[in-house]
């Protein structure tokens, strides 16, 4: 099942600011899955997991 997260949700999960998440999206470090009708970014939980694992060197996801 595809779970989509908003910028603020990703920021809270990764303990970074929403601006950091936006910068990662703009730099294509974290792919934007889709945008809402209002233009807000939506991120796939799987992509957030992958980024977290790559950035931390962890072997598995321990986030929410």
Image (spheres, rainbow, N blue to C red):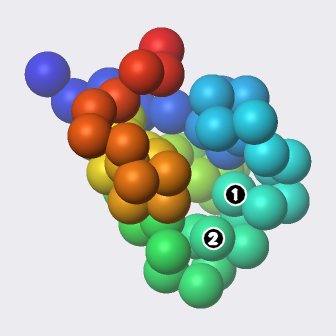
Residue 22 vs residue 62: left or right? right
Q: Name the residue located 42 percent from the left edge and 66 percent from the top edge.
A: 31
Report the quarter where the N terminus lies: top left
Residue 51 visible somewhere in the drawing: no
Q: Quadrant of residue 8?
A: top right
Q: From mark 1 to mark 2, how far is it between C-alphas?
A: 5 Å
How far from the left and from the top, in percent, is residue 55? Answer: 49, 59
What residue is drawn where x is 78% and y is 61%?
A: 20
Find numbered disc 2 in the image and state the secondary structure of the residue it sits on. Answer: helix
| Rendering coords of residue 16 (x, y %) | 79, 45
- Residue lying furthest bottom: 27
6 relative to 51, above or below: above
Q: Is residue 18 left or right of residue 57?
A: right
Residue lying furthest left:
1
- Mark 1–mark 2 contact, CB under 8 Å? yes
Name the image quarter holding residue 61. top left
State the residue in front, 58 or 28: 58
Q: Nearer the viewer, residue 60 or 18?
A: 60
Residue drawn at 85 percent across, 48 percent down: 17
Can you give x and y, in whole percent of width and height, for residue 48 in the image?
Answer: 43, 45
Q: Is residue 42 above or below residue 28?
A: above
Badge 2, how many Cα within 10 Å: few under 14, some, many 20+?
A: some
Q: Secondary structure at mark 1?
A: helix
Find disc 2 in the rendering and name its residue.
24
Residue 64 visible? The answer is yes
Residue at figure coordinates x 42%, y 21% from the top left: 62
How many marks overall? 2
The residue pinned by badge 1 equals 21
């Amino acid at each position: 099942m595809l779970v989509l997260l908003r910028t603020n949700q990703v920021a809270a999960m990764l303990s970074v600011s929403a601006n950091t998440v936006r910068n990662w999206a703009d730099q294509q470090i974290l792919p934007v899955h889709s945008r809402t009708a209002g233009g807000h970014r939506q991120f796939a939980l799987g992509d957030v997991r992958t980024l977290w694992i790559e950035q931390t060197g962890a072997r598995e996801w321990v986030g929410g």
